Image (tube, rainbow, N blue to C red):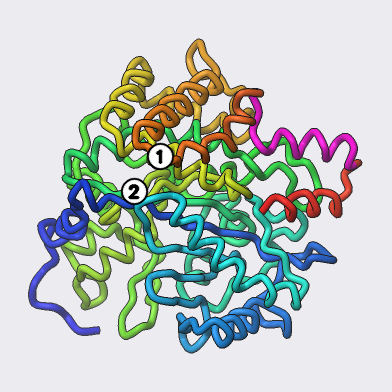
């Protein structure tokens, strides 16, 4: 390892965030959409290496639809085409990351186009990409990590009792939002954190895992609560003042998992924080801006700062529900009046209230208590604020809100429907669960 002459500074790191500033007319919205690949007959998770596994599926799709390979040590770990990517999470979960767009309709067209292109290929292989938050049948002990070096190191390091579940079994949806300035970014960041537990509750969709009713409506959210408290949860005290520098400090004080040199990972195994690495180096090497970017990517808060804001904690859901997630955030975070209404809604709540709610949500979702109200009461207000905001924009995007309104008005999440049917007319029949989830695209 070569020792560098100039130390990395906070000013260098700050530029990673300030370069994200956008003009109001350039604000876009993005989605990262993960799904679980299962065998349509056996319901087992599809592996990486087999003849009809994910590797060969990606190779075939790349050739037929002219995508380029993304590789790690010559192993295919994803595909890219222009500004869209199709990548693999640790347990072969398939993630579409579409180029951000001005409207949700444009994003939907992009997702639909990719899905239509890959559909005949996966159908030939008897593969279903399931819109669901946790593996319904195969558990993590039977799911191998894909051949991506960083995933193997992460799997060894992450110390939470459900970290293997999180890595190998879960699928979520993330929303990406732009900002105009540091002030705008921090206002959105704080509000997004406060919205996060309510959004997790509304879109809970992972109660059945390993063929049994877990007793949780979002087992995926539960797994994140038990992954690594050093790098998960809320970043900062979300009811207090916050800045880019405060966010950077949170990343700096997090134990390091590994660094990369010459495309090879070198394990640090939590022995030092990034702050210590910047100050003292490590085994003859000094911190670089690329090291910080890696460290920031290995930091997993509910809401993550990049040169955009990444809102992370939602189960994978099907149909227009996935676009309802985007619609709520767009309606609120791109409208100053809507933001003010939400801030007023939450003004009597403190950090500890949101923190306690976060721990109650996986089991009780919308019926969770927060002070004298239920999460449901807040969810209805959140939906109303977002819907009214989108109506003002006159883009028609408020239509996507309808998908979640149907559930929330009944006081339920998608998980409640699954639990009722699983313990009722489906008689715990996995085939019926998969059929329902497969039809809900």
Which comes sooner in the sequence, label 1 or label 2? Answer: 2
Q: Residue at x 74, y 45 (%)?
A: 208
Q: Residues within 10 Å of mark 2 (few under 14, many from 20)?
A: many
> From the viewer's perspective, is 289 left or right of 269?
left
Q: Residues within 10 Å of mark 1 (few under 14, many from 20)?
A: many
Q: Residue at x 53, y 32 (%)?
A: 359
> From the viewer's perspective, is 50 left or right of 255?
right
Q: Is residue 92 above or below residue 26?
A: below
Q: How many marks?
A: 2
Q: Which residue is mark 2?
A: 177
Residue 131, horizontal then vertical, whole percent: 65, 54
Q: Which residues are magenta?
A: 411-426
Residue 261 in which image quadrant: bottom left
Q: Residue at x 35, y 52 (%)?
A: 102
Q: Which residue is mark 1?
A: 329
**Quadrant showing the C terminus:** bottom right
Residue 65, horizontal then vertical, whole percent: 54, 81
> From the viewer's perspective, is 11 left or right of 408?
left
**Quadrant showing the N terminus:** bottom left
Residue 23, horizontal then vertical, whole percent: 18, 50
Q: Are marks 1 and 2 in contact (CB under 8 Å)?
A: yes
Is 67 contained in the magenta span?
A: no
Instruction: Check disc 2 and report its element: helix, strand or loop.
Output: strand
């Amino acid at each position: 390892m070569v020792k560098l002459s100039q130390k990395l500074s906070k000013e260098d790191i700050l530029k990673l965030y300030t370069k994200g500033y956008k003009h109001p007319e350039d604000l876009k919205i993005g989605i990262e959409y993960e799904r679980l690949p299962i065998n349509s007959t056996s319901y087992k998770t599809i592996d990486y290496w087999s003849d009809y596994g994910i590797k060969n599926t990606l190779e075939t799709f790349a050739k037929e639809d002219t995508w380029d390979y993304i590789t790690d040590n010559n192993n295919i770990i994803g595909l890219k085409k222009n500004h869209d990517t199709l990548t693999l999470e640790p347990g072969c979960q398939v993630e579409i990351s579409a180029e951000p767009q001005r409207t949700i309709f444009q994003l939907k067209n992009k997702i639909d186009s990719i899905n239509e292109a890959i559909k005949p290929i996966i159908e030939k292989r008897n593969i279903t990409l399931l819109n669901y938050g946790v593996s319904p049948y195969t558990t993590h002990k039977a799911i191998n990590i894909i051949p991506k070096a960083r995933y193997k190191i992460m799997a060894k390091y992450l110390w939470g009792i459900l970290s293997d579940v999180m890595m190998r079994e879960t699928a979520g949806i993330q929303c990406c939002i732009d900002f105009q300035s540091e002030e705008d970014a921090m206002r959105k960041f704080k509000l997004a954190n406060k919205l996060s537990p309510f959004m997790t509750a509304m879109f809970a969709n992972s109660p059945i895992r390993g063929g049994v009713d877990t007793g949780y409506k979002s087992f995926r959210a539960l797994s994140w609560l038990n992954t690594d408290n050093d790098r998960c949860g809320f970043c900062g005290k979300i009811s207090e003042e916050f800045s880019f520098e405060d966010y950077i400090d949170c990343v700096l004080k997090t134990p390091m998992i590994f660094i990369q040199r010459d495309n090879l990972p070198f394990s640090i195994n939590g022995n030092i924080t990034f702050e210590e690495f910047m100050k003292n180096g490590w085994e003859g090497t000094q911190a670089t801006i690329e090291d910080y970017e890696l460290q920031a990517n290995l930091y997993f808060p509910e809401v993550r700062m990049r040169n955009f804001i990444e809102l992370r904690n939602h189960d994978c859901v099907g149909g227009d529900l996935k676009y309802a997630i985007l619609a709520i955030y767009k309606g609120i975070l791109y409208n100053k009046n809507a933001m003010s209404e939400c801030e007023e809604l939450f003004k009597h709540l403190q950090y500890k209230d949101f923190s306690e709610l976060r721990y109650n949500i996986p089991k009780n979702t919308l019926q969770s208590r927060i002070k004298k109200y239920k999460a449901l009461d807040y969810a209805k207000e959140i939906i109303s604020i977002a819907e009214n905001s989108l109506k003002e924009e006159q883009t028609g995007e408020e239509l996507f809100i309808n998908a979640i309104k149907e559930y929330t008005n009944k006081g339920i999440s998608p998980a409640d429907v699954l639990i009722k049917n699983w313990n009722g007319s489906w008689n715990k029949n996995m085939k019926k669960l998969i059929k329902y989830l497969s039809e809900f695209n």
